[in-house]
Amino acid sequence: MASSSDPSIGDAIRSAHALFLTGVLIMCLWLLSWPAASEKLRLFRAAQDVHAWLYLKERLSMLNKNVFADGANESISEDIDSELQVAPNPGQPREMHPPLEVVSVWPNAEKSLAELQPQSLPLINDKEAELVRSYRIHVEKSTLRFDDYVVIFLSDKEYQSASESLPLPPLAIIPAHARILDQKKVSLRMLEGLMLQSSRPKRWADLDTHLARYGFSKAPQDLSSSNEALVRLRADVDPRTSSGDIQVFGVQLSISQFFSAVGGLMALVSFAMIGPLTLLRRGRGQPVVDPWILVIARRRGWVPALLEGAICISTVAWVLLPLLLLLLQTANFAELGSGERLAFLGGAVGLGLSSLVHALVAWELRLIRSRAQQAL
């Protein structure tokens, strides 16, 4: 065991003190940058919702299958197409039933199999119900959340809109949580109002003002996935691109770097803290003379007791702060791509290691204060 005059314990405390402040500074800087990063991710998710709605609208508006030819309780997973036969009847059309697919270009280029599953509407009578088909959209293995929408078809042959100035669209795609879907009874006129007013992306309100800055200020029904304003917007809100980088006090970081950097830096700080921690454990019982408040002994009384309580709360917060950062990252990072998730895992390991090392150091500092208190 080191002697009482061994200066290594004092050196260990001073090193722990410096690393303590370094770690707190890193985590505070990251937290100060988090609102901007969170806003970037919020707009990114809103852009994904808008694209999901647009891809559905563009695909279902080209649906060749007559949904009214089937029963209202039947699912639809195929479309109808035709091609000219080569044999045995050359030149004659042949009907085909290709699977219903939704093609998306952004944020990832992919084709997803879709199924329209019956969604009941609380219409007043059966006659009106025959004029309507509604389906919950189910798409397998897609980056976009197509399942958040319901599509409503209205028979234009048997029903005329009461709003001549606002003709009904051939279909309406509404958010699955729309209030009218939870009502007990609705009329066809109420449903018409829903189709005119609620056929829009789930998070349209988050992006309409941003789209206006790029020159698009019309209704969402007039927007297309190839619209120039939308293309410019998604380039700016996509955190995976260079134009979507996050600014951290003048330093540009990609989303991968932003999420993994704090964990990597804290892992380095924690690794450096292992040396002082080892010396503190070996030198238990030695007298400590150091001006750091986390190791200073205090006399008895209610004021020192309050100060000790504040120190305990602050050290617990120091231990839990890396886990708080990890929680913030986990809540917002799950929707990004696989490459970013791999970087996130490295940062998550660093934050977990930091919390563990912080807990061990906080315990040793607590023991030092307790022994110094007993010596008074």
Image: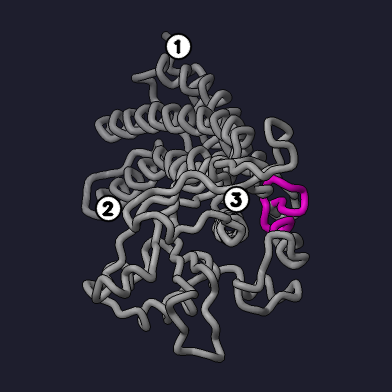
Find out whether the residues at labels 3 and 2 contact each other: C-beta distance under 8 Å. no
Marks 3/2: CA–CA distance = 29 Å
Residue annotated with mark 3? 29
User: Can you tell which mark lies on residue 2?
Assistant: 1
Number of disc labels? 3
Quarter of the picture holding the C terminus: top left
**Where residue 110 appears, x then y in whole percent?**
63, 40
Q: Give the class, few, some or many, for how many residues have Cα within 10 Å of label 3's Cα (few <14, many ≥20).
A: some
**Where residue 314 appears, x then y in whole percent?**
38, 46
Marks 1/3: CA–CA distance = 38 Å
Q: What residue is drawn where x is 43% and y is 79%?
A: 159
Q: Amino acid under label 1?
A: Ala
Q: Is residue 193 left or right of residue 232?
A: left
User: Can you tell which mark lies on residue 276?
Assistant: none
Is 344 part of what is drawn in magenta? no
User: Where does the magenta region start and end?
Assistant: 234-245
> Which comes before the other along the chain, label 1 or label 2?
1
Q: Amino acid under label 3?
A: Leu
Compared with 208, 114 (above or below) is above
Secondary structure category for the residue under label 2: helix
Q: Nearer the viewer, residue 133 or 2?
A: 133
Residue annotated with mark 2? 306
Q: Give the class, few, some or many, for how many residues have Cα within 10 Å of label 2's Cα (few <14, many ≥20).
A: few
Q: Amino acid under label 2?
A: Leu
> Which comes before the other along the chain, label 3 or label 2?
3
Query: From where the camera sits, is residue 32 visible?
Result: no
Q: Please state which of the two labelled residues, at mark 1 or mark 2, is closer to the viewer.
A: 2
Secondary structure category for the residue under label 3: helix
Is 239 part of what is drawn in magenta? yes
Q: Is residue 352 left or right of residue 99?
A: left
Query: From where the camera sits, is residue 151 visible?
Result: yes
> Which comes before the other along the chain, label 1 or label 3?
1
